[in-house]
Image (cartoon, helix red, strand yellow):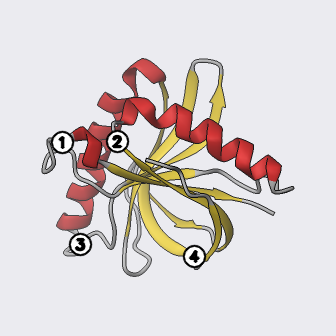
Amino acid sequence: MKLEFKTIELAAQPYLGICTATTMDKLAETMGSLFGEVYGYIQQSGQAPAGMPFTIYHSMEGDTLEIECGMAVASPMAGADRIRAGELPSGSMANVTHMGPYDDLPRTWAALTEWIKSQGLEGAGAPWEVYVTDPGAEPDLSKWRTDIFFPVR
């Protein structure tokens, strides 16, 4: 699939999430556990997620990743314990849709960062991935859709 890069404007979006440090080899396992915890908290609060799960990449130093796994909510909610309330930022975002297995995401990320540079833009905050396709519901990896958003200026 040919990657289509663009810049879009997004409105701020409240969410609940959990921050943690992990490594690339433990990323999928960590994310699955944290998404389950956030989803359970939202349900126990009598709400439903207002979008698909996402991961914010706060830092990628060496083999260690500082990530936040979250889910959008319709209106701001209070967090509890390690679940914290946050807000995805508004503003200009470089955006691309990745179709296919998660193992191929690093190539899409590299292409997006090159495109950002080629457009004379620079990163203006932590980027995130939205997992549009639920892997548990879609066994065909080629149909997995991941949207990447990177705040730019």
Identify which residue, 120 or 42, lies in the foreground: 120
Local SS, label 3: loop
Q: Residue at x 58, y 18 (%)?
A: 63
Q: Position of residue 132 (x, y in %)?
A: 33, 58
Q: Label 1, on which residue?
A: 140
Q: Are marks 1 and 2 in contact (CB under 8 Å)?
A: no
Residue 12: assigned label: 4
* Amino acid type for the residue under numbered disc 1: Asp
Q: Label 2, on which residue?
A: 100
Q: Name the residue at the front extreme.
A: 2
Q: Are marks 1 and 4 in contact (CB under 8 Å)?
A: no
Q: Label 3, on which residue?
A: 48
Q: Position of residue 121 (x, y in %)?
A: 82, 57
* Amino acid type for the residue under numbered disc 4: Ala
Calculate the distance from the C-alpha at mark 2 to the C-alpha at mark 4. 28 Å
Q: Determine crowd level at label 4: few under 14, some 14-19, many 20+ residues with C-alpha closer than 10 A.
A: few
Which mark is in front, 1 or 4?
Answer: 1
Q: Earlier in the sequence, mark 3 or mark 1?
A: 3
Q: Determine crowd level at label 2: few under 14, some 14-19, many 20+ residues with C-alpha closer than 10 A.
A: some
Q: Determine crowd level at label 1: few under 14, some 14-19, many 20+ residues with C-alpha closer than 10 A.
A: few
Identify which residue, 126 or 44, lies in the foreground: 126
Residue 70: assigned label: none
Q: Is residue 96 left or right of residue 104?
A: right
Calculate the distance from the C-alpha at mark 3 to the C-alpha at mark 2. 27 Å
Q: Residue at x 44, y 66 (%)?
A: 15
Q: Are marks 3 and 2 in contact (CB under 8 Å)?
A: no
* Amino acid type for the residue under numbered disc 2: Gly
